[in-house]
Image (tube, rainbow, N blue to C red):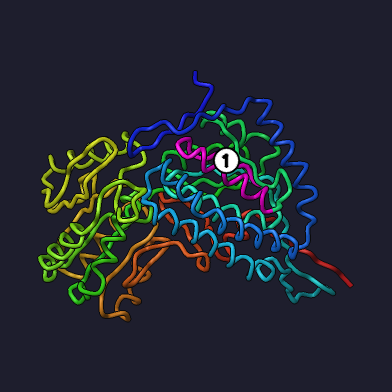
Amino acid sequence: MSTTIDTKNPYNGDALKSYPLDSENAIQKKLDTAEATFKSWKTYDIEDRIDLLKNLADTLHQSKNRLSTLMTQEMGKPILESKAEIEKCIFLIDFYVKNSDQFLQDDLIETDAKESFISYDPLGCILAVMPWNFPFWQVMRFAIPTLTAGNVALLKHASNVTGCAVAIEKLFLEAGFPEGCFQTLITDHQSVESLIANPIVKAVSLTGSEKAGRKIAELAGKNLKPSLLELGGNNACIVLEDADLEKHIETMVKARMQNAGQSCIAAKRFIVVDRIYDEFLEKFTAQVKTLTSGDPMDEDTTLSCLAREDLAETLKEQIEKSVALGAQVAYGDQKDGAFYQPTILTEVTPEMPVFKEETFGPVAAIIKVETEDEAYEMASNSQFGLGTMVFTADHEAAIDRISDIEDGGFFINEMVKSDPRLPFGGTKISGYGRELSKEGMLAFVNTKTVYINH
């Protein structure tokens, strides 16, 4: 059994760093530190917490180039996308700097009492189990509202971005957060069960696969602890016959190919009305061909390798099984180590893996339908429920269809994306609970009724 986590660069295979796994005693010490810190941290005035958020934003800004390089080295994201991820984290912090006080204020409720209100008290130590695809953003969108609400956090990050996990803990310390407010655990997935069972841990947040979500939900339920799950997706992109392809085709390609397609909310199924199908396929393919593959440290690179070679193998299997069922390769489908060429599949039908499963890589499944009604029905034919995007000139008609889609998001003429100002999360096997906005700040609080009689 390995006693270290060893990270490597997926683009060139170079070894990066070796991290000793935390011992059981070390993990317990971090748990004890979290519990002790919570007792004081929960008493901080909101203004003091907001001042620390401002420090954190400054620290992130000053460290942007270094952290972006680390992210790119560990999981292969093009360097400009890494820098954009850090900038989005700063935007997130700025949102909570401006709004946390309002979000956490007591809500006065008029009743028969002399005074009655709802207060929002932090729960304590919250465990976060986070993925590698957005190593800083996924953690920060959990941590910023959770800590600002008065909780403390423990992070179990994906092993291939352990350097990012260590760097995030250092960021909080450098910004002046008390020791124990945010701690990284260098451990394997086997320890998650005992962590959730530990009485110091009060709740758990997971961003990850459906399989991981089912396990975490089972463990949280067994221990009667709240959980928030943001799981996989196979978002539909509906393209209606009045869609402005000249204006929106670049957005559609970005919705699939950003981060080499390694995103839960990427557009994975393009459902196109037949009257515009040929034009769409021509323009989509032409736009995909403009992507520049290469070294992720090169600022000209717009699409690089996947985060691990096994991910490319899984994607290849999904494509091969779909082709065996009748899908046609319209473009791409070449694998080289962890790199997978952008791929476009046509003649896709619902029984194929690229339709019904989550594909975590740069493959676009194109489905032709005859009518708008069929397009919405096809989009809803999914066990996932993160988000749907619709491209059309008739905004009002699309608005009338909002209730036809069960997903957590409905985007008209825009790719599905997370925004600190809006709640984010899914339905069905894409999980439950909401991050970001006010909902994200109240995800791990005790919503307490206070009633004062005459």
- Looking at the rendered image, the quarter that the C terminus falls into is bottom right
Label 1 crowd (10 A; few <14 / some 14-19 / many >=20): some
Q: Amino acid at mark 1?
A: Val
Based on the picture, tell me whether residue 173 belongs to the magenta stretch: yes
- Count of marks overlaid on the render: 1
Q: Residue 141's spot in the image, x, y percent?
A: 54, 56
Residue depicted at 12% across the width and 48% down the height: 329
Give whichever of 416, 290 is nearer the camera: 290
Q: Residue 50's spot in the image, x, y percent?
A: 69, 63
| Left or right side of 381 for 193 | right
Residue placed under numbered mark 1 in the picture: 166
What is the span of residues highlighted in magenta in the rendered image? 153-175
Give whichever of 428, 33 is nearer the camera: 33
Q: Main secondary structure of the magenta part?
A: helix
| Left or right side of 126 for 207 | left
Residue 10 against residue 290 in the figure, above or below? above
Q: Residue 255's spot in the image, x, y percent?
A: 31, 60
Q: Residue 17's spot in the image, x, y percent?
A: 49, 32
Residue depicted at 80% across the width and 75% down the height: 112
